[in-house]
Structures are given as structure tokens and as C-alpha cells.
Amino acid sequence: MEPDPSLNPLSPRRSPVTPLTVFLCLIMVFFCGVLVFVYAATKRAHPMMLDQQGRPLNHSSEHQR
């Protein structure tokens, strides 16, 4: 009598890919893309500090990167 191969802990099992798994993976890829886009946009931005009247502040340490 042969043992059932599905009970063997060393045999590889293939679980079906459910639509929910695919959907959640697509959401994860989308949010990672949003994070990369926001990171790239913030690296290109050059924010300016404004005073209470809306005029730019002049600091000597403005371009110390």
C-alpha cells in the first residue's frame, strides 16, 4: 500500500492563485509606484520659506545641500 503523496510534507504543493491574491498584489504594486513618484517629485521640488506677509525669506544657508 503506497502512502498518499498529498500527505508527504516534502512534496511540493501548488496552491491556486486566487483573484483576491492578484488584486492585492496589483494594489501593492500601485502603492509602491505612488511612493516612487512622490519621492521623485519631492527630490525635484525647491521649497521656499515665506514670512508672514508671503515674501521669501533670505537665508545664507539656503543652498547648503
Image (tube, rainbow, N blue to C red):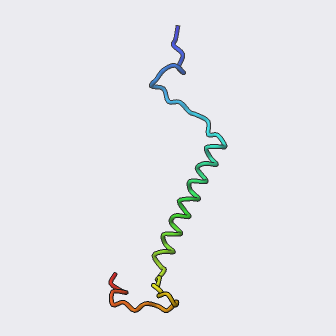
Q: Which of 26 and 47 is in front in this view?
A: 47
Quarter of the picture containing the C terminus is bottom left
| Quarter where residue 64 is shown | bottom left
> Residue at the spot x=56%, y=56% of the render?
29
Q: Position of residue 63 (x, y in %)?
A: 36, 86
Q: In this view, does 10 lie above or below 21?
A: above
> Residue at the spot x=46%, y=85% of the render?
48
Q: In this view, does 20 lie above or below 10?
A: below
- Left or right: residue 12 versus residue 23 is left
Q: In this view, does 50 lie above or below 33?
A: below
Q: Position of residue 8 (x, y in %)?
A: 48, 20
> Residue at the spot x=61%, y=36% of the render?
16
Q: Which of 26 and 62 is in front in this view?
A: 62
> Residue at the spot x=65%, y=43% of the render?
20
Q: Residue furthest right?
A: 19
Q: In this view, does 11 lie above or below 22?
A: above
- Left or right: residue 12 versus residue 24 is left
Q: Nearer the viewer, residue 65 or 27?
A: 65
- Left or right: residue 64 versus residue 57 is left
Q: Nearer the viewer, residue 57 or 41?
A: 57
Tally the marks. Answer: 0
- Left or right: residue 12 versus residue 65 is right
Q: Where is residue 58 in the image (x, y as percent from the top left)?
A: 40, 92
Q: Position of residue 1 (x, y in %)?
A: 53, 7
